[in-house]
Amino acid sequence: MDDRVFKLWEIPMAKPAVVASALAHLDPAALERCKQRHPLPVLRRALDRAVAGSSVRSVRAEVPARGVRRFVDLETLPAEFAAYLDRAEVQAALNTRGAGEERSAKGEEDGQGLGRSIMRNVARRPVLRRLAERLSFRPGHYVTLALNSAFAPIQVHEEIVSLLALVARQQPRSVLEVGSSRGGTLYLFTKFADPRGVLVSVDLRIPDPDLLRSFARRGQQVIPYQGDSTAPSTIAAVRKVLPSAIDFLFLDGDHSYEGVRRDFENYAPLVRPGGIVALHDIVEDNGARYGVITGGWAGGVPRFWSELKQAHEHAEFVHDRAQDACGIGVVFVR
């Protein structure tokens, strides 16, 4: 195993990807062939073992703002990993380990810091989480809870805390979120929106609408809407449930340049003067910077944001300019 530490732009691979994200970026056909043999969580652990045993070639590289990570080559990974999975001793081990994956994960959790383990247990148990919420009053308290929950948002702590402080001052009564993902960001918005507010979350796929509805505080209404944010029927549905002007619009849906532009053009005109529009992932990802996949994905949002902010009063919440995507841009509607 090569233990040199490369710069991202020096990695000697055709298509380098950080190990933790490699399976998600495999060719769909290759990934499907692997998934037919074992569940994805089992495959992730198998890949870790294949890398550790040098059955899959890997190198280390320094990721800005994140430290040293190990990378594999997406071009050679399918063949290398398939050969590893074909080995008789590996198949036998995977078949016996599959049932023990949950116990293994529990063991890893036990090895974490006690405070972090306690927080994770609190955040993932609804009754304990609600008790912790009663003791929370600052944005940072709620963000810590959310980041340790099963619906954790893909956010940088400092950035989302800054946005929530702004939302808390506005106390928006009508909120539209485009792109709900697991629901963690919506959860945070409910804590700082008006207690009588209506919050709508639009996404192509919402696996658990009831979970999103459960985030509503007493007096609030949370409305999950599954559909294409650019479809006329979706826009009409949003106008129906939010007949008055929108106070706060959060865009975190389609990350292509054309997609985020369409979402802005469709929904920003619905925001009242004095309201705010926020966009997530305004910072370029390492795939765009160096051609290296390190887990972040900003797509065309940074390009759109760089154009948009030229014409509007705005603010940026960015923890580290060298980070891999994330970052929040805010437009103040006048």
Image (tube, rainbow, N blue to C red):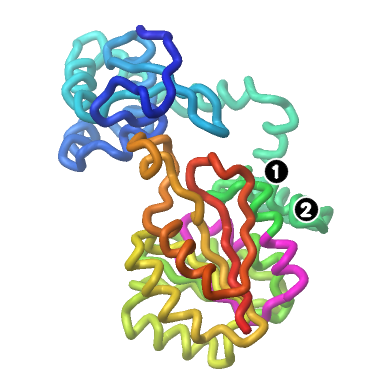
If the image is split into quadrants, where does the N terminus sit? top left
Q: Residue at x 47, y 28 (%)?
A: 102
* Residue 42 in the image, given as x and y percentages of width and height: 35, 28
Q: Image height check: is 283 above or below 294?
A: below
Q: Which residues are magenta?
A: 163-187
* Residue 273 in the image, given as x and y percentages of width and height: 63, 87
- Under mark 1, the amino acid is Val
| Residue 184 is inside the magenta segment | yes
If the image is split into quadrants, where does the C terminus sit? bottom right
Q: Which sits in the foreground, 20 or 118?
A: 20
What residue is shown with label 2?
Answer: 131
Q: Earlier in the sequence, mark 1 or mark 2?
A: 1
Q: Secondary structure at mark 1?
A: helix
What residue is shown with label 1?
Answer: 122
Q: Image height check: is 134 above or below 35?
A: below
Instruction: Check disc 1: other Cα within 10 Å, few if <14, some if 14-19, many if 20+.
Output: some
Q: Which sits in the foreground, 316 or 228?
A: 316
Instruction: Check disc 2: other Cα within 10 Å, few if <14, some if 14-19, many if 20+.
Output: few
Count of labels shown? 2
* Residue 239 in the image, given as x and y percentages of width and height: 47, 88
Q: Residue at x 56, y 53 (%)?
A: 327
- Under mark 2, the amino acid is Leu
Q: Secondary structure at mark 2?
A: helix
CA–CA distance in space, label 1 to label 2 = 9 Å
Is residue 45 at all visible to an observer of this figure?
yes
| Residue 133 is inside the magenta segment | no
Q: Residue at x 29, y 39 (%)?
A: 25
* Residue 324 in the image, given as x and y percentages of width and height: 49, 41
Q: Image height check: is 27 above or below 300?
A: above
